[in-house]
Image: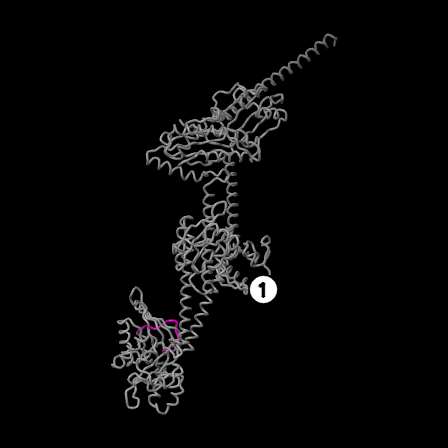
């Protein structure tokens, strides 16, 4: 093959290769064209998705960050209509200097996605023009071109309002729970009762200071198990059994337990109860023990007194009884059952059952005597025979004394004395007078025989009792004999004598007083019978000296009266405590305490002083008693001196000591008085001053002072509880930072004010105030300075608010003012004054001037913008937004 032919073949091969390359390039161009078309279609699809997305999205491209994409959700959020083709600086010039462009430059440099922390923004959700605050995350996503260079940044605004609000609500709930827990702990710690909680293993989970003191525990180490405390009467094992009983039976257990502390025994009313968890399972046992030592001692004293009285009656064979004429109920003492011959029972017999025990012959006489005593309204004395269970009869001396109320007999009280043996003795004496004359002469009972009411016989006992000799008695005339009887008792003796001599019913036995020869007054119990003496009718008087018994009866009567007074005082103290604890306010409490003190100390006069004012001076809040005595009470300044010198104990002083103390010329009463300090947990509250203590006995003074001390303690406890309730009420309706009303209270009061304004035809205006750029203050100066600004705003608003106007913190830096009976024009003028006054604020914090701040105020009025609280607040909120949008530091009215 020639060279030319070889060249042609080579050219043909090269041409073929070039044609194949052209065909390959054409295929690549076609493939790239398809990819370009697919990419354009994908871009258009993605662009459509972004535009239709409810999430605000926009894309900035180029060096100047020009809007290439902005979906409707974003335009609605920023309230713009046309941003495409414009740079972000043109649309939002205020972003200059805010760090936004520095953020974009950092993303360009790093090429990394960035998520901006949550931030607040106002949005119109439903297109109504009403703005509400929302929280958002801003996601920056860098966009690269085909060369891989970053030439744009995609912005995606993600709303996290629900998450933020949920977190805020959780934080508020945790704060509230912590406050409630602390409040509960404070209440438990300051309770005088012993409070503790143990788990099922006996470990102490919770205990107050009272429990720690009782158990000798360190209050800071109460999680340790209580050890073997052998000071308690109930052992640890016994207490564990009680707690185990609560766990097993799932029921509370109440016991009275004694605790020995040193030389003192304390008595506690203890309740143990199960405590459940959220699943309903018992996981602990609670214990509350109340100190009832004083009540227990008081009841023990009463029981001992009743026991001694019953023992006295048993020894004397003297029973007591009471019969109510209205209820026809009969009450017997134990000894009455014994004397009458019936078994002792807790239930007294009826009057019919009692009548069946009386001998039939005596029953008619008893009914006649009762009818006579009821008609004549006189006491009576009667001897009766009673049927015993063994069929025999005993004889009793029954005495009855009417009890009057409002001039009418309401009750008979009396005694029954077993005189069976004495009656038998009298019968034997009548049957064998001569044989037992010697016994009569040596009897301890006095015996006189009268004929024509002159003494014809007197035994030695009668001579001993009267102090006269037989010769002196025998020569006495009837008038001289009557002179031996105490003048007050003589009419009764003469009346009974006349009835007996005329054959009419008369008490055979009665008591009277006689005057001995030496002038001593003695009580005698006399029994008179008509006898035949030396063939002539005579009256035999047998009597015994019952002076000691009468003195014992008087002591018993005084003791019963003392017990009755103590019971009445306890009932009054209980009523006073209940009334004071239920009082709705301090004024109501002080108004109620005066009458109770007047009841407790009805025989005295006095006053209640309370400490008032920052200087701690005394102020008289209530008085009772005689005004002439009240004028002689200690003046407040002297009371202050006395309180400072004797602040930890009651003071009892007589006239002389009072004169030495106060040196007043008008203190002329020689009866003593007392001053009792009133305390609460956190310090002194005042003093109770009582003058003219009524009893001449210092023992009774101590009783009255004890009563005054208890009354003072109850008053102090009631005052402390009232202060606690008032503090809690104030905290519940006020914002703790600014001292203004809180949002909850305003939401309750605003509808009421609108309703009141509507019913009276008067407008109610509302101002919604917001501190401009408050977040910048917090970010720049710190939250403590921000709080100081809020406090200063609160002070200024309170100073500028008068009359019925209400001012409160509505949330964050927003304040709300409710102006009843105020038109919109008046409210606008008032708002402008507030704005100027707040703009001129010169407050300070820690010696440094507060940063300058301004406020924007929205004004709405009920008759123009809404008759409900929601509408009025929304209108004011819209006006506030308008003030913010138009430059801040201004007042705008609602449209």
Main secondary structure along the magenta-highlighted residues: loop
Residue at image mark 1: 230
Find residue 140 and report its horizontal and vertical position in percent. Answer: 57, 27
Q: In this view, does 119 lie to the left or right of 479?
A: right
Q: In this view, does 412 lie to the left or right of 723?
A: left
Q: Quadrant of residue 523?
A: bottom left
* Image quarter of residue 759: top left
The stretch of residues the image draws in magenta is 339-351
Left of 184 or right of it: where is 377?
left
138 or 389, nearer to the observer: 389
Q: Within the magenta stretch, is there residue 333?
A: no
Q: Which image quadrant for residue 514?
A: bottom left
Residue 593 visible to an observer of this rendering: no
Residue at position x 36%, y 74% from top?
415
User: Percent position (x, y) of residue 311?
Assistant: 44, 75
Q: In which quarter of the image is the N terminus?
A: top right
């Amino acid at each position: 093959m020639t060279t030319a032919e070889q060249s042609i073949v080579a050219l043909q091969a090269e041409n073929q290769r070039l044609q194949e390359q052209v065909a390959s390039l054409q295929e690549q161009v076609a493939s790239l064209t398809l990819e370009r078309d697919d990419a354009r279609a994908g871009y258009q699809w993605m662009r459509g998705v972004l535009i239709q997305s409810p999430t605000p999205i926009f894309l900035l491209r180029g060096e100047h960050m020009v809007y290439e994409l902005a979906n409707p959700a974003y335009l609605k959020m920023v309230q713009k209509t046309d941003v495409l083709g414009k740079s972000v600086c043109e649309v939002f010039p205020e972003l200059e200097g805010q760090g936004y462009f520095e953020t974009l430059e950092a993303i360009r440099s790093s090429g990394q996605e960035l998520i901006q922390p949550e931030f607040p923004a106002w949005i119109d959700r439903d297109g109504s023009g009403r703005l509400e605050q929302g929280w958002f995350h801003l996601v920056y996503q860098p966009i690269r071109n085909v060369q891989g260079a970053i030439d744009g940044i995609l912005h995606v605004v993600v709303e996290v309002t629900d998450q933020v609000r949920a977190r805020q609500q959780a934080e508020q709930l945790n704060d509230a729970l912590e406050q409630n827990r602390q409040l509960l702990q404070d209440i438990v710690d300051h309770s005088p009762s012993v409070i503790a909680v143990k788990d099922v293993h006996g470990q102490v989970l919770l205990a107050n200071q009272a429990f720690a003191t009782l158990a000798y525990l360190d209050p800071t180490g109460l999680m340790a198990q209580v050890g073997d405390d052998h000071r308690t009467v109930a052992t640890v094992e016994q207490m564990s059994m009680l707690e185990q009983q609560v766990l097993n039976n799932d029921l509370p257990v109440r016991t009275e337990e004694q605790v020995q502390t040193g030389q003192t025994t304390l008595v506690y009313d203890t309740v143990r109860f199960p405590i459940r968890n959220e699943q309903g399972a018992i996981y602990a046992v609670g214990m509350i023990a109340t100190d009832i030592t004083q009540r227990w001692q008081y009841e023990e004293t009463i029981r001992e007194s009743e026991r001694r009285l019953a023992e006295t009656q048993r020894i004397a064979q003297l029973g007591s009884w009471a019969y109510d004429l209205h209820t026809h109920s009969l009450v017997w003492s134990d000894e009455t059952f014994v004397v009458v011959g019936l078994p002792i029972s807790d239930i007294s017999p009826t009057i019919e059952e009692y009548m069946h025990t009386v001998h039939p012959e005596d029953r008619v006489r008893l009914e006649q005597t009762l009818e006579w005593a009821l008609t004549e309204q006189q006491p009576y004395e009667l001897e009766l025979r009673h049927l015993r269970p063994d069929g025999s009869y005993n004889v009793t001396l029954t005495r009855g004394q009417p009890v009057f109320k409002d001039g009418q007999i309401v009750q008979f009280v009396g005694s029954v004395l077993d005189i069976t043996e004495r009656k038998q003795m009298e019968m034997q004496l009548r049957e064998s007078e001569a044989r037992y004359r010697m016994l009569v002469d040596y009897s301890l009972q006095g015996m006189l025989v009268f004929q024509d009411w002159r003494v014809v016989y007197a035994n030695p006992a009668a001579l001993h009792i009267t102090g006269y000799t037989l010769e002196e008695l025998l020569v006495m005339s009837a008038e001289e004999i009557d002179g031996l009887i105490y003048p007050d008792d003589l009419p009764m003796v003469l009346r009974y004598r006349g009835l007996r001599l005329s054959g009419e019913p008369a008490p055979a036995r009665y008591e009277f007083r006689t005057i001995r020869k030496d002038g001593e007054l003695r009580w005698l119990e006399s029994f008179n019978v008509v006898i035949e003496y030396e063939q002539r009718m005579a009256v035999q008087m047998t009597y015994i000296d019952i002076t000691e018994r009468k003195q014992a009866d008087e002591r018993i009567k005084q003791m019963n009266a003392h017990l009755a007074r103590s019971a009445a005082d306890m009932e009054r103290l209980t009523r006073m405590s209940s009334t004071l604890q239920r009082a709705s306010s301090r004024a109501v409490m002080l108004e109620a305490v005066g009458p109770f003190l007047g009841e407790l100390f009805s025989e005295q006069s006095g006053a209640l002083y309370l400490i008032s004012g920052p200087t701690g001076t005394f102020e008289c809040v209530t008085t009772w008693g005689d005004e002439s005595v009240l004028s002689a009470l200690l003046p407040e300044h002297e009371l202050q001196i006395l309180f400072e010198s004797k602040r930890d104990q009651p003071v009892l002083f007589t006239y002389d000591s009072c004169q030495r103390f106060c040196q007043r010329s008008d203190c002329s009463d020689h009866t003593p008085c007392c001053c009792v300090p009133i305390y609460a947990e956190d310090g002194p509250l005042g003093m109770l001053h009582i003058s003219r203590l009524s009893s001449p006995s210092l023992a009774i003074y101590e009783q009255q002072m004890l009563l005054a001390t208890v009354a003072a303690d109850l008053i102090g406890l009631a005052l402390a509880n009232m202060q606690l309730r008032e503090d809690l009420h104030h905290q519940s309706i006020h914002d703790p930072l600014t001292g203004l009303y809180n949002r909850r209270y305003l939401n309750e009061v605003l509808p009421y004010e609108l309703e009141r304004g509507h019913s009276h035809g008067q407008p109610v205006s509302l101002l919604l105030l917001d501190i401009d750029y408050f977040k910048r203050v917090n970010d720049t100066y710190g939250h403590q300075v921000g709080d100081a600004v809020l406090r200063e705003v609160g002070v200024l608003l309170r100073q500028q608010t008068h009359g019925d106007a209400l001012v409160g913190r509505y949330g964050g830096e927003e304040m709300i003012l409710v102006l009843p009976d105020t038109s919109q024009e008046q409210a606008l003028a008032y708002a402008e004054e507030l704005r100027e006054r707040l703009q001129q604020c010169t407050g300070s914090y820690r010696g440094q001037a507060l940063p300058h701040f301004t406020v924007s105020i929205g004004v709405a009025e009920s008759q123009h913008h809404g008759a409900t609280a929601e509408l009025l607040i929304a209108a004011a909120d819209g006006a506030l937004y308008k003030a913010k949008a138009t430059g801040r530091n201004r007042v705008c009215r609602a449209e």
